Image (tube, helix red, strand yellow):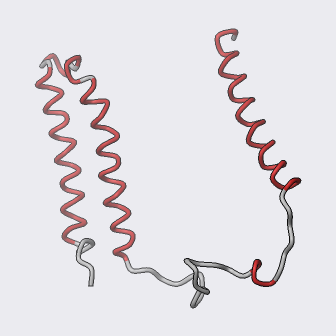
Amino acid sequence: MQSYAPLLMLIVFVVANGVMMIVASHILSPTRPTGPKDQPYESGMPPIGGAHERFDIKYYMVAVIFIVFDIEVVFMMPWAVAFRQLDIMGMGTLGGLIEMFIFVVILLVGYLYVLKRGALEWT
């Protein structure tokens, strides 16, 4: 239990700091509500239409592309750092290379799916 004491202290400090900042901002911030301040604001223009409009699927496909390639980078960095120490199935670094090749092929399939759906074609 003693080895977890620094971690527990850090968690308590972070939570207390977060709560303290929120409470301090509510207590110390000046509030003068007026009509224009209470209206919604979007990119310097008054909003047009409702907030629950339907969006084209292309926006979601771009988000999927971003997530796919973001995850690719996140998983490739530790693999590249530990590449020389990899010994997968007793094959040495060749096993690690095959493993990453399979990973990239899976990501390529996702990219080709999004490309086929036309997410990169803006009209």
Give the residue displayed 19% in from the left and 45% down from the top. 104
In the picture as drawn, the residue positioned furthest to the bottom comes out as: 49
- The structure residue drawn at horizontal position 67% and vertical position 17%, both measured from the top left corner, is 6
User: In x, y percent, where is residue 2?
Assistant: 69, 9
Query: Which residue occupies the foreground of this view, 81 or 98?
Result: 81
Above or below 83: residue 53: below
Asked if 106 appears above or below 110 in the picture, the reply is: above
Q: Is residue 89 positioned above or below 11 on the image?
A: above
Residue 25 versus residue 86: which sits nearer the camera? Answer: 25
Q: Decide if residue 89 is on the left or right side of residue 11.
A: left
Location of the N terminus by quadrant is: top right
Across the whole image, how many numbered discs are drawn on residues? 0
Which of the image's four quarters has the C terminus? bottom left
Residue at horizontal 70 percent and vertical 15 percent from the top: 5
x then y, percent, for residue 80? 24, 29
In the rendered image, the residue lying farthest to the top is: 2
Q: Is residue 19 above or below residue 38?
A: above
| Residue lying at 64% horizontally and 10% vertically, measured from the top left | 3
Q: Quadrant of residue 39?
A: bottom right
Q: Residue 25's x, y, as percent? A: 81, 52
Q: Is residue 98 left or right of residue 86?
A: left
